[in-house]
């Protein structure tokens, strides 16, 4: 698994999966092409709620344009596609999440070796496994804190955002399933 290459050791994680009746190629393309407006109103609402504390503190809002692919927008907001192959996409971001004052998002080339104090490394993947007539698509997010201070701060942040984060990932997977199965039925 490529995710292990980028973040083998971590302090926090979450994993979700869904079964999809489509080819791996259609699923990967659905992940890349999916627009926020294809996901759900709840997705946008949860991101809006998540943006309220940063707005109050004068930080940038992480809202999404409805008609631009979500992965492209995530890249514009600091995530980096670390690696893609025929069964996995890995994204990463490094920043100072959970900081009440303005936290930084680092635009880096060396995700693996980055270890600046008071920082958090986040790696997320989409992983596909073929099983008979279905593909099992999972997404896992791993979080590594570079020091005790960032871990304490992130623990509070994670307790607040985890329920919404888990829900976002579940509805994101359902949207990928809808798009990839729709594309498969159009090709038949």
Image (cartoon, rainbow, N blue to C red):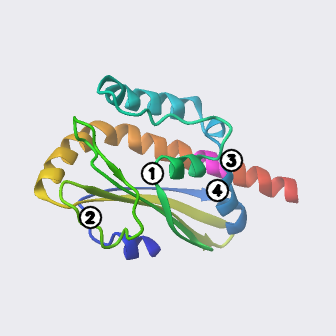
Q: Nearer the viewer, mark 2 or mark 1?
A: 1
Q: Nearer the viewer, mark 4 or mark 1?
A: 1
Lateral position of residue 28 relative to residue 96, left or right = right
Please report whichever mark, 3 or 4, sits nearer to the chain's N-terminal start: 4
Q: CA distance from mark 3 to mark 4?
A: 14 Å
CB atoms of marks 1 and 3 within 8 Å: no
Looking at the rendering, the stretch of residues picked out in magenta corresponds to 174-178
Q: Earlier in the sequence, mark 2 or mark 3?
A: 2
* Mark 2 → mark 1, Cα distance in angstroms: 20 Å
Q: Which mark is residue 32?
A: 4
Magenta stretch, main secondary structure class: helix
Position of 138 relative to 105 (above/below):
below
Q: Is 106 part of what is drawn in magenta?
A: no
Q: What residue is shown with label 1? A: 78
Residue at mark 2: 10
Give neighbour class at mark 1: few <14, some 14-19, many 20+ (Cα, 10 Å): some
Instruction: Kindly report which numbered mark, 1 or 3, lies closer to the viewer in this rendering.
Output: 1
Q: Reading the chain from its start, which is encountered first: label 1 or label 3?
A: 1
At mark 2, the secondary structure is loop
Residue 176 lies within the magenta run = yes
């Amino acid at each position: 698994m490529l995710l292990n290459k980028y973040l083998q050791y971590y302090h926090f994680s979450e994993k979700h999966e869904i079964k999809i009746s489509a080819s791996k190629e259609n699923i990967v393309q659905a992940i890349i092409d999916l627009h926020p407006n294809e996901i759900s109103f709840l997705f946008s609402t949860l991101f809006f709620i998540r943006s309220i504390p940063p707005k109050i503190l004068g930080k940038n809002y992480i809202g999404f344009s409805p008609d631009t692919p979500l992965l492209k927008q995530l890249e514009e907001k600091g995530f980096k596609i670390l690696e893609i192959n025929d069964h996995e996409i890995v994204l990463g971001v490094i920043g100072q999440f959970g900081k009440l004052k303005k936290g930084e998002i680092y635009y880096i080339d060396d995700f693996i070796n980055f270890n600046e104090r008071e920082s958090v490394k986040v790696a997320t993947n989409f992983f596909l496994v073929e099983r008979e007539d279905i593909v099992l698509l999972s997404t896992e997010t791993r979080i590594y804190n570079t020091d005790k201070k960032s871990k304490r701060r992130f623990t509070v942040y994670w307790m607040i955002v985890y329920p919404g984060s888990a829900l976002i990932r579940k509805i994101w997977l359902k949207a990928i399933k809808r798009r990839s199965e729709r594309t498969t039925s159009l090709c038949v």
